[in-house]
Structures are given as structure tokens and as C-alpha cells.
Image (cartoon, rainbow, N blue to C red):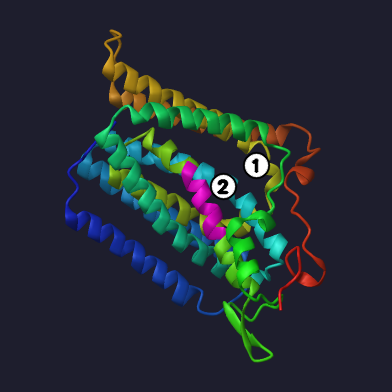
Amino acid sequence: MAEGLNWSIATWVGFNALLAVALIFDLFVLQRKDHVVTIRESLLKSLLWTAVAAGVGAWIFLEKGNQAGGEYVTAYVIERALSIDNLFVFLVIFAYFKVPREYQARALTLGILGALATRALFIVAGVAAISAFKPVLYILGAFLIFTAIRIAVSHNKEVDPGKNLIFRLAKRFFRVTDRYEGHNFFTVENGVRVLTPMLLVVLVIESTDVVFAIDSVPSVLAITTDGFLVWSSNTMAVLGLRPLYFVLAGMVKLFRYLQYGLAVILAFVGAKMIFNEATEQFDFGFHLDKSVETYGSLGVILLVLAVSVLMSKLIPFKKAAAEHRAPEAAPGGAPAGGADH
């Protein structure tokens, strides 16, 4: 596991500057006008972000060697897989709020922008905790195993955006209209400034992605505790999947067993985290080469993902529609509970 690699300040600044420029270009140039994202546009943007992620990975291989490069790729694959599973929740959110298709791309981008800031805090806290007290890895490993069990047994539970805490607080303390006013967050009704559903959608996406980060950040820390590798793999995976949402949204059946694969992956990396820490603390007379461990883990993760997709393709499709159906919105397009005026 690559720990505490000597990344220069220039590297951190350069990477985050590249990230900021790309996001600003995407949000204010490519999405300057609200429009329905076509499959072609979605694929091109996804390929672009994947190419950027590959470029970052290639630079890490050249700069820091095979070990660091392998950990970046493994962490990226885990994050990408978790992000694919998360898109089904975004499907539910958009259906619940009846978000017009032309506003969905902007809602995703704005929601993820806020979530990235929260993930940065999680990563800093996680790396700092591990540096200060290595046995915290046992806790994180156990948490990942617990999360794996929770994911495996929650296949028939629906996600209800109406129960989101941020959404309920906004509805309670602010006036909310049920009409979309472009991608604006506020509008005026009867001389009173009110919130639009667009703001609620972004807030729910952001708060939901914070919950996702609670699972995803520890899973990457099981692969590497190097802050730059954790941050770069997280951001590249999340941003790379965002445009592909509009393609994958129509491929629910292909990923309906993905959550079981993710459960296996999280249990595997959690157990690996515990085992690695135990072998460092106690001499078991067995030490696996770090490169073999890293690329072996990558192989296991890719195999599990392939099997889960293959199962989704081969096993007859019976309950996928029920498993991924969205809660119904209230009549008139307002979220359940109606609009407050």
C-alpha cells in the first residue's frame, strides 16, 4: 500500500486547477443552454472524462511507479462501480421530482460539485485518522463488511427522496413552488420569493452523495491511504460517470445484480484491510508482495463486476422493474406532500 508518497504542492495545485477548469468549461460552456442530453453527447463526454482519468493514471505510473499506479487504477475501478450503482438512486430522485430532461444534466453537475467538497473533508479526516492511529483500519474494515451485508440484504427496499432530511427541512421552513423556472433555484409568486423544485433536487442529490461517500471513501482507503491517490481516483470516477448517466439510465436490467457484486467487493476490501493491518502488527510469517496484492485485488474486483453483469444478462428478468421503481410523486408534479405556498 502506497502511504505518504511525496507529492509536491505543485502537483496538488495543478491537479485541482485542471479539475476546476474542466468543471467550469463543462458547466458554463457545454451546459450554457439547458437541453436534453443525447446518447451521442453523453458518450463523448464520458469518453473525454475517461481519457482524462487515464491520463492521470499514466502520469502516476510514470511519476511514482507501478505500485502507486496500480493502486490508483484499483481505487478508480471501485469508485466507478459504486458510482454506477448510485445512479439508480438519481433515477429515483429525478422521477420523484419529475425533473424535466433538459434540466437533469445541470442538476447532476451542481449536486456533485457540492458533494466533492464534502468528500474532500472525508478523505482528509480518514487519512489523518489512519496516520494518527493505525488500528482505525480495523474499524474501517469492519464498517465495510457491515456495509456489504447491508447492501446484500436491502435489495427490495425503495429509496424515498421525500424522507431526505434536507428536503424535509427545506419544505418545513421555506415556501416551495411546484413549478420549474428553468434551472433557477428561486422564483417569485404573488410578490413572495419562493424555492423551486430545482433547488430541492440539487440539495437531495448533494446530501445523498454524502451518504455514498461514507461507503466509498473507506473502500478506497482499503486500497491506499495516500491522500492524492484517494482524491484523484474519487474525483475521476465520480465525474467520469456523470455524463454516462444518460446512457446507463436506460440499461437498468444490465446492472440489476450489481449491488450483490458490490457487496462482495466491499466485504473483500474490508477483510483485506483488516488482514493487512493484522499482518503488520503481528508476525504471521507470511508477507505478500505489495504489487502482487494490488494487482490481485484489481483482478478480483474486475472478476466480481464481470460476473454480476453476466448474471444480470443471463438470469431471467423478473423483478428488476419492482426493485428499481421510483416512488410516485404527488399529483400535479409536486413532490409527495404537495407544495407549500
Residue 114 lies left or right of residue 307; in this view the side is left
- Tell me the residue at 27%/48% (across/down): 59
Look at the picture and state if 202 lies above or below 9: below
Is-magenta flag for residue 172? no
**Residue 328: percent from the left, percent from the top?**
79, 58
- Which of the two residues, 290 or 109, is positioned nearer the viewer here? 109
SS class of the residue under badge 1?
helix
| Residue 180 visible in the snapshot | yes
- Tell me the residue at 34%/68% (across/down): 21
The N terminus sits in image quarter: top left
Q: Residue furthest front?
A: 173
Which segment did they paint magenta? 205-214
- Tell me the residue at 36%/52% (across/down): 121
SS class of the residue under badge 2?
helix
- Which of the two residues, 330 or 237, is positioned nearer the viewer here? 330
Q: Which residue is mark 1?
A: 255
Separation of disc 2 and disc 1 at Cα? 8 Å
- Tell me the residue at 49%/60% (across/down): 112
Q: Quadrant of residue 43?
A: bottom right
Look at the picture and state if 259 lies above or below 13: above
Q: Total of numbered circles in the picture?
A: 2
Q: Main secondary structure of the magenta part?
A: helix
Q: Which residue is mark 2?
A: 84
- Which of the two residues, 257 or 44, is positioned nearer the viewer here? 257
Residue 80 lies left or right of residue 341; in this view the side is left
Dot 2 and dot 1 residues touching (CB under 8 Å): yes
Say what amino acid the circle numbered 1 marks: Phe
Which disc is residue 338 wearing?
none
Is-magenta flag for residue 212? yes
**Residue 190: percent from the left, percent from the top?**
69, 90
The C terminus sits in image quarter: bottom right
Say what amino acid the circle numbered 2 marks: Ile
